[in-house]
Image: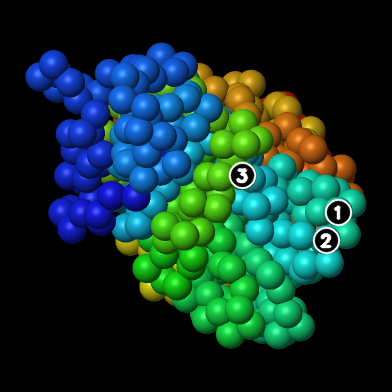
Amino acid sequence: MSNNNISAIGIGTNAVWAGEEEQRVHRATQVPVVVSVAYSYEDMDEWYDVAIGKKSGHIYGRNTNPTVQAFEDKVRALEGAEAATSFSTGMAAISNTLYTFLRPGDRIVSIKDTYGGTNKIFTEFLPAMNIQVALCTTGDHEAIEEEIKKGCKILYLETPTNPTVKITDIERMAKAGKGVGALVVVDNTFATPINQNPLMLGADLVIHSATKFLGGHADALGGVVCGNKELVEKIYHYREINGATLDPWAAYLLLRGMKTLKLRVERQQQSAMEIAKHLQNKAGVEAVYYPGLETHVNHDIAKKQMRGFGGMLSFALKGGMEAVSILLPQLKYAHRAANLGAVETTYGPARTTSHVECTVEERKAMGIPEGLVRISVGIEDVEDLIADLDQAFEHLYQNYKA
């Protein structure tokens, strides 16, 4: 777990340099991958001081690791946090955070259309632990505030949401949550620290699935939680005992990927805006979801709390899954896969990606049409991505009859 001082330099510079100096050895310019499980001490008192956290250092790989610490320090700096701790996956970050603070009889308030895995925790696992869960319509801030007033231990937000990129006013909701003494947690995976810093808007903790935009190359799993030192230490303690530790090699890949985070996100969101506008004019497209569009229901909120609108968008086809099944296989510059945030463009319907765990009825209740397609825009030339979409739509028009 890391808790170094917060850096005041630019976010792009932090993405390249933050968290690395302490871990570089032998005059290396890059952080090494330290795979040692244990660390040896000749001085018994020093060993003890490190073991109890009185002195910095490492004891055992399930607890801390130099490569992992560099990754944590970089994310901490980008989010402007006091401390950060990492996990083997994004879902481990989410579940460990919730289980650290929730106890039987507690109440949590959230929104209906969080990521499918998160939603399963809310609808299946927490109720089984006698924890009350109130899920509100995303964007209905008055309804969320009413539920908060009834009392809650945690207010959990995801903004933009996966996959419909809905927006919640973090500052307004954080104020309401703090009013009843709730812990305010925000999943910032879609926005990334480049576009949004929930801690600056009043959140207590910010979570990332580092697998996605932070790593950016679809080759490493990981998760991370940032916030004030006291809260993060509690989460770290839960994680070190329960064992969802980030692998050092994955930490290295995530660390390397983050060096280009600002460049990638800037390119991805520029292309996403062009693609979103293009899709609005396509026959057969029922709706386009992108917070950068003025037609987005919460565009004004997104513009207020985000520096950019991100590389994620989605659209719904009038023909549902039948039309999706004709369109997607025709794309040349796209993976059809259950991932996002990578340098390659990736497409996928919610029923096989973000909400594969949910039934048709559950997805419908969350406002996710069966014909919805999520696009994670890559760094390719946008002209090629749009031309690719055009030829796929032409194939759809020729082969789909409503």
Against 153, is 69 above or below? above
- C-alpha separation, residue under disc 1 versus residue under disc 2: 6 Å
Q: On the image, numbered disc 3 is attached to which residue?
A: 238
Q: In this view, does 187 lie to the left or right of 132?
A: left
**Could you tell me which residue is drawn at 67 percent across and 40 percent down?**
354
Q: Position of residue 262 (x, y in %)?
A: 28, 43
Q: Is the Cβ of the residue at disc 2 closer than 8 Å to that at disc 3?
A: no
Amino acid at pointer 2: Pro
Against 113, is 135 above or below? below
Q: Which of 168 and 259 is in front in this view?
A: 259
Residue 295 visible in the picture: no
Q: Where is residue 130 in the image (x, y as percent from the top left)?
A: 88, 59
* Among numbered discs 1 and 3, the one appearing first in the sequence: 1
Amino acid at pointer 1: Met
Against 39, is 170 above or below? below
Q: Is the Cβ of the residue at disc 1 closer than 8 Å to that at disc 2?
A: yes
Q: On the image, numbered disc 2 is attached to which residue?
A: 104
Q: Is residue 44 left or right of residue 262?
A: right
Amino acid at pointer 3: Tyr
Give the crowd class for mark 2: few <14, some 14-19, many >=20 residues within 10 Å.
Answer: few
Kind of element beneath mark 1:
loop
- C-alpha separation, residue under disc 2 versus residue under disc 3: 17 Å
Q: On the image, numbered disc 1 is attached to which residue?
A: 129
Q: Where is residue 116 in the image (x, y as percent from the top left)?
A: 72, 45
* Among numbered discs 1 and 2, the one appearing first in the sequence: 2
Kind of element beneath mark 2:
loop
Give the crowd class for mark 1: few <14, some 14-19, many >=20 residues within 10 Å.
Answer: few
Q: Quadrant of the C terminus?
A: top right
